[in-house]
């Protein structure tokens, strides 16, 4: 036990050292490389390293404590702005994950139940994962304010959630299908010999068996949902999220990118938080693991 | 593991494609050493489904999806023309086809720009990912330092780094987008290659000890050749992801001459059919990269029983 | 061809502990040049550990190990032994011939010489026509024959085999046993052979070493029924598979099988308080 805890501690220390190394490399580049960068044959091969391009790490961190807009009536620190935007985006991504996850699971059950559905649809599901469907994000943006469903006017954030769910949908449907079809033939035949119907087999055998496949799929889907939400915010111009905040800061701060960099750090932290949440889910579902090597 | 399992490994690539949305743009694995393997395993899972799909050799394999595709197109056309669906929601297939015809030279040019960026970034990221993985496999300290950083990178939205590179290299060059693609590609290639280098069968380990092989011989005869299917899987995962990253990076500013900016500017000008024409081009480009990655993998591993089981 | 005077393997008072588990306790065993010795016993009796100690894959906790008159480590570095495991462990990406060449390549033998030797060995195991094939195209038995050819590549005077036929079906297994006897006869190499099959041990061996667990030790050594090969018989294909079949049907064979079985039972009876 002790050695295991020690190993964890050691791994964590190395991880910290790894990130410290990144910071050190950044600062080293500032120190060693020419401020104007290096241009070879009209192409800049080394970056500009002055404060207008690569601010010191501590400048970026210090920026977090500064009010977002100087002299505003209700001053809000940059950190607070980033945190609330990241939470907003996280909410949209979570909504997208849930919507996409439910749809993906239903499609997987459908494909498992009807071989024809699997044959007809699966190639498209697979292919859709290899093509840049996120490209349609700007098109979904056009829905905002133009359509209404049952009296509810389409909101821009709903577009973001739809795109996010779209990206989350595919990994889950494919992972779930693989899980549903994973029980060995002998197990399926045992259920058949017990005269268990399709529904019982699904509930008692296929669903539990699919958990080990579903967990990594959810991990992929969560990362996809976050990326989808951020990209969708930008291309739909939805305000309030971290993606949009990055663009706003980028446009408002020529000459001092540290505020934008702080927002990008916020987006990175958001991704890590989402991955961490899936990790917790994984811990909770641990007892279903193990049947898959 | 026999053919089945190996296929799962071999075509883990498709899993990465699963990651596309994620593996591609954001990341493919999870956080933590254990999760990393799980992530790739999950990816392999997707691959196995592909494999299963490929094994059905009956006519229905071709007929069912083709019929389904045609049915969807016809239904789509009917809904738009008869049902009067507004163009901003979904333009008719015929309208999109018309735009593809009208805009063909622009589409080809734009696709070439994005494809070039994706290719340069893919090559750079692939080389970098493989080299880093070999270094990490050989030197413990390097592995301890790099692995957590790469795993964290797999969880964060890498495309959001686009503005950083644009600020550093200027908004008039292709470099920022190519760098975004590079970083996106490094992640799955590193994870997959590192996994391959770790997966030496115990019997091969013992054999090399019994043969009194040196460390270098061990690497040359067993470790590197054994990792090659995994390296190719990483490449296949990364190839379509490179295209997606190249497109999406444009949404974050910088040079506006690729598919991403064409789609958003057409959408902003309410030229929806034209935007969809560029989306179609993106899809073709993505498929092209995917198939190229798949082909490369099959060619390299064709003599292996099942990848690297 | 036999005998330089030194024993192939000489073990004295060998102990091996894994933590608090005594895998081997006070093992003394000498294998003469050209002798075929089997190790048999229930799982956990240390028979594989013993083989691995001889191969220098494990270091003994106490006792002395001499292989071909030198230390186990030196014997490994000098390639004085060849080894085959339960899994053939062929490298998938190499052809059959390239797999056989591997030990020679590791020790810097030139390409032409490697080729020649591989061809020779593949003929010995009857796989000449598969030289260019990939391991995956071969059956389990054929893969194991390639592994044996690989083990023989550096012309060792000692062959270590850890349940090499354990994963094969019974028919293939019996064929492989005849094959192995022929090869051992032709090369004159001593063989240390780990198995859990009583008939296999009896039909192959000059001596069957019976072991028992907790702690792993030798309880009895019984004469095997290895078919005799006359000295002037040492030409290729000298050992007719039927000669091996004949042995299996002799009364002496059944007696030896019974003796080994009883030795095993006795070993189990002395094992633990329940016995």
Image (cartoon, rainbow, N blue to C red):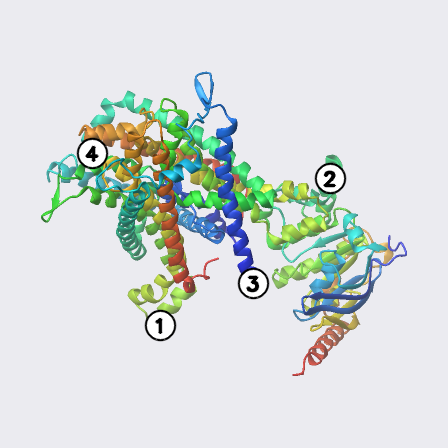
Q: Residue furthest right?
A: C5
Task: Compare marks 3 and 1 and give the one earlier in the sequence.
Answer: 3
Q: Chain of mark 4?
A: B
- Give the secondary structure at mark 4: helix
Q: Are marks 1 and 2 in contact (CB under 8 Å)?
A: no
Task: Have a look at marks 1 and 2 and say if they share a chain.
Answer: no
The residue identified by callout 3 is A2
- From the top left corner, tell me how far across and down residue C222 is, in percent: 79, 72
The residue identified by callout 1 is A194
Q: Disc 3 versus disc 4: distance between alpha carbons?
A: 64 Å
- Mark number for residue C114? 2
Q: Is residue B150 left or right of residue C42?
A: left
Q: Quadrant of residue B137?
A: top right
- From the top left corner, tell me how far across and down residue A206 is, in percent: 36, 62
Pick whichever, B158 or A183, lies toward us: B158
| Rendered position, B73 above or below C53 | above
Q: Is residue B262 left or right of residue A25?
A: left
The answer to whether residue C225 is visible is no
Q: Nearer the viewer, mark 2 or mark 3?
A: 3
Q: Is residue B103 left or right of residue B288?
A: left
Q: Disc 1 versus disc 4: distance between alpha carbons?
A: 50 Å
Q: Chain of mark 2?
A: C
Q: Disc 3 versus disc 1: distance between alpha carbons?
A: 47 Å
- Mark number for residue B93? 4
Q: Nearer the viewer, mark 1 or mark 4?
A: 4
Identify which residue is drawn at 76% across, 66% down. Answer: C15
| Rendered position, A142 above or below C156 | above
Task: Have a look at marks 3 and 1 and say if they share a chain.
Answer: yes
- From the top left corner, tell me how far across and down residue C72 is, in percent: 79, 55
Q: Residue furthest top?
A: A41
Q: Disc 4 versus disc 2: distance between alpha carbons?
A: 65 Å
Q: Chain of mark 3?
A: A
């Amino acid at each position: 036990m002790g050695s295991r805890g020690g190993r964890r501690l050691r791994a964590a220390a190395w991880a910290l050292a790894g990130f410290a190394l990144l910071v050190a490399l950044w600062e080293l580049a500032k120190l060693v490389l020419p401020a104007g960068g290096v241009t070879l044959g009209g192409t800049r091969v080394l970056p500009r390293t002055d404060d207008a391009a690569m601010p010191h790490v501590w400048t970026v961190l210090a920026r977090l404590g500064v009010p977002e807009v100087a002299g505003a009536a209700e001053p809000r620190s940059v950190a607070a702005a980033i945190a609330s935007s990241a939470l907003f985006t996280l909410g949209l991504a979570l909504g997208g994950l849930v919507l996409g996850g439910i749809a993906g699971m239903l499609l997987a059950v459908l494909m498992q139940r009807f071989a024809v559905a699997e044959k007809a649809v699966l190639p498209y599901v697979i292919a859709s994962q290899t093509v840049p469907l996120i490209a349609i994000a700007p098109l979904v943006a056009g829905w905002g304010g133009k359509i209404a469903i049952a009296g509810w006017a389409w909101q821009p954030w709903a577009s973001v959630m739809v795109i996010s769910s779209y990206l989350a949908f595919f990994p889950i449907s494919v992972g779930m299908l693989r899980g549903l079809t994973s029980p060995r033939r002998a197990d399926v035949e045992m259920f058949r010999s017990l005269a268990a119907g399709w529904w019982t087999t699904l509930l008692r055998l296929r669903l539990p068996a699919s958990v080990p496949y579903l967990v990594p799929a959810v991990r992929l889907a969560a990362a996809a949902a976050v990326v989808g939400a951020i990209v969708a915010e930008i291309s739909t111009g939805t305000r309030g999220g971290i993606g949009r905040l990055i663009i706003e800061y980028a446009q408002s701060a020529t000459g001092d990118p540290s505020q934008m960099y702080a927002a990008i750090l916020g987006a990175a932290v958001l991704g890590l938080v989402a991955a961490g949440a899936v990790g917790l889910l994984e811990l909770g579902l641990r007892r279903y693991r193990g049947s898959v090597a | 593991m026999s053919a089945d399992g190996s296929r799962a490994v071999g075509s883990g690539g498709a899993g990465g494609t699963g990651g596309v949305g994620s593996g591609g743009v954001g990341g493919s694995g999870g956080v933590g050493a254990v999760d990393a393997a799980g992530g790739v395993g999950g990816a392999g899972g997707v691959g196995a489904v592909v494999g299963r799909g490929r094994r059905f050799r009956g006519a229905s394999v071709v007929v069912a999806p083709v019929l389904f595709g045609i049915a969807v197109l016809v239904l789509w056309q009917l809904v738009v023309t008869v049902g009067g669906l507004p163009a901003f929601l979904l333009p008719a297939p015929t309208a999109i086809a018309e735009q593809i015809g009208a805009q063909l030279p622009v589409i080809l040019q734009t696709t070439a720009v994005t494809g070039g960026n994706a290719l340069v970034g893919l090559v750079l990221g692939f080389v970098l990912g493989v080299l880093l993985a070999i270094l990490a496999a050989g030197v413990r300290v390097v592995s301890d330092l790099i692995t957590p950083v790469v795993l964290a990178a797999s969880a964060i939205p890498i495309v959001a780094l686009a503005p950083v590179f644009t600020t550093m290299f200027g908004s008039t060059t292709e470099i920022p987008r190519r760098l975004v693609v590079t970083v996106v590609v490094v992640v799955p290639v590193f994870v997959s290659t590192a996994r391959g280098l770790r997966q030496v069968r115990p019997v091969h380990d013992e054999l090399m000890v019994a043969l009194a092989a040196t460390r270098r011989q061990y690497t040359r005869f067993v470790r590197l050749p054994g990792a090659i299917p995994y390296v190719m899987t990483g490449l296949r995962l990364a190839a379509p992801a490179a295209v997606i990253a190249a497109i999406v990076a444009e949404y974050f500013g910088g040079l506006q001459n690729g598919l991403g900016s064409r789609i958003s500017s057409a959408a902003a000008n309410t030229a929806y059919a034209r935007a969809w024409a560029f989306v179609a081009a993106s899809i073709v480009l993505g498929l092209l990269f995917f198939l190229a990655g798949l082909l490369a993998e099959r060619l390299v591993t064709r003599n292996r029983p099942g990848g690297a089981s | 061809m036999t005998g330089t005077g030194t024993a192939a393997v000489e073990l004295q008072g060998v102990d091996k502990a894994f933590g608090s588990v005594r895998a081997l306790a006070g093992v003394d065993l000498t294998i003469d040049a050209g002798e075929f010795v089997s190790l048999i016993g229930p799982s956990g009796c240390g028979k594989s550990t013993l083989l691995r100690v001889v191969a220098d894959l494990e270091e003994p906790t106490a006792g002395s190990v001499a292989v071909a008159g030198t230390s186990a480590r030196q014997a490994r570095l000098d390639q004085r032994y060849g080894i085959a495991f339960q899994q053939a462990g062929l490298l998938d990406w190499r052809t059959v011939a390239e797999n056989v060449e591997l030990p020679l390549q590791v020790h810097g033998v030139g390409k032409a010489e490697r080729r020649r030797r591989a061809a020779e060995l593949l003929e010995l195991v009857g796989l000449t026509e598969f030289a260019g094939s990939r391991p995956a195209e071969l059956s389990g038995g054929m893969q194991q024959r390639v592994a044996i050819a690989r083990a023989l590549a550096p012309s060792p005077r000692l062959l270590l085999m850890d349940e090499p036929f354990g994963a094969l079906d019974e028919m293939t297994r019996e064929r492989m046993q005849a094959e192995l006897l022929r090869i051992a006869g032709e090369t004159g190499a001593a063989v240390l052979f780990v198995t859990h099959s009583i008939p296999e041990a009896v039909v192959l061996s000059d001596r069957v070493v019976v072991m028992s667990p907790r702690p792993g030790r030798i309880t009895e050594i019984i004469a095997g029924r290895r078919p005799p090969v006359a000295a002037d018989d040492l030409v290729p294909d000298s050992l007719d598979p039927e000669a091996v079949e004949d042995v299996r049907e002799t009364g002496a064979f059944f007696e030896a099988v019974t003796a080994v079985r009883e030795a095993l039972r006795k070993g189990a009876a002395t094992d633990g308080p329940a016995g």
